[in-house]
Image (cartoon, rainbow, N blue to C red):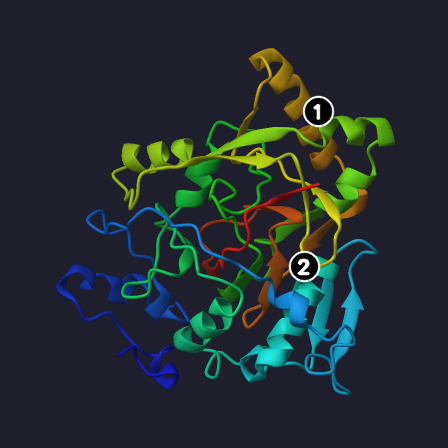
Amino acid sequence: MAPSVADLKSQEPTSQAHAELKAKLSGASYPFYYPSFDVNEKFPPTELFDHSDSGLRADASKPNLLNANTITRDLSPYLGTEITGIQISQLSQEGLDELALYAAERKVLLFRDQDFKELGPERQIEIARHFGPIQRHPTSGNVKGFPEFHVVYRDAEHDRFREYSGRDRASGVSWHSDVSYEKQPPSTTFFFILDQPDSGGDTLFLSQVEAYKRLSPEFRKRLEGLRALHSAVRQADFSRERGGPVRREPVETEHPVVRQHPVTGEKALYVNQGFTRRIVGYKQEESDNLLNFLYDHIAKGADFQIRATYTPGTVVVWDNRVTAHSATVDFENTFRRHAVRLTPQAEVPIPA
């Protein structure tokens, strides 16, 4: 049985392996969510499953999600809405259906002032499973006993994500859509902010729908029907080289370069620098030139990007099918940043 939610903030690690964590975590608000990198933990290969998006069941007027106490503020015409007056922990099944639709429409939602005493790990997982089976990350830190959680943690002694971006790069910005190498990549994704610096540690998001729309009609025609290879190999190699876990062997999967959302019908680019490796059927030079153009187009599209800022108690919900994002590691690691992600998987990408 998991610890009671009321005890999470005060719980201290008890196993011998975590004996030294007490001092390290003396300032952490939620030491329960400290990352575990158990190299002996193994997962079976991911199996295909049938999926019907919960947004298809939603009432378009969203009466079970939005109410008279709800305040919303759009961050951009294309994506991003800040929301207060809703506790995600209290949403009904119908409210969660409407949440899926709202996330698909607005791409990124920021729910402020969430009560993590009510929204503990069991409820977090229960909510995320409403949208599909939760991806268990093959290499990242997870929570001991709760492998569904992907943990983001950085402090003075832990700087793993900066290392992954590359210490010799001029910028730490790295646009990606989470685990796009999966046969059935994620959709409605949840990110729970536990500890956050007063300044910095934000996330950049962009609309892959608007990125696609900005291309000329003739160029869009040439992209439709193309497929690209997405790969987990580099991620697995990075973990192995540093003595980290590889919980299942890395997969490589072909996905459409332009995919269609199953609920809104919107078309979106589906390539990203993090995991896309080449255009299927193209020579390497041809693939590199096309992908580099698309990456450059995405990265320079400040008018279809937002910078999401966080405070502890924020829950971010975004649709990985129609967005890309990048961390901004712009704060000194003397400050603690701690968050956890739940990443439900969805349909096999639908070609446009």
Which type of secondary structure does the marked residue at label 2 adopt?
Answer: strand
Q: Residue at x 45, y 74 (%)?
A: 126
Q: Quadrant of residue 349?
A: top right
Depth order, front residue of 173/142: 142
Estimate the spatial distance between the alpha carbons at disc 1 and disc 2, rounded to whole Å: 25 Å
Q: Position of residue 113 (x, y in %)?
A: 60, 77
Q: Quadrant of residue 224?
A: top right
Looking at the image, which residue is at 38% across and 61% down? 148
Residue 111 visible in the current orientation: no
Mark 1 sits on what residue?
Answer: 293
Above or below, comparing residue 274 to residue 310 in the picture: above
Q: Is residue 267 left or right of residue 47?
A: right
Q: The N terminus lies in which quarter of the figure? A: bottom left
Q: Residue furthest right?
A: 217
Q: Label 1 sits on what residue type?
A: Phe
Q: Which residue is mark 2?
A: 108
Name the kind of residue labelled 2 in the image.
Answer: Val
Q: Position of residue 79 (x, y in %)?
A: 75, 56
**Element on which disc 1 rests:** helix
Is residue 335 shown above or below 232?
Answer: below
Above/below status of 27 relative to 320: below
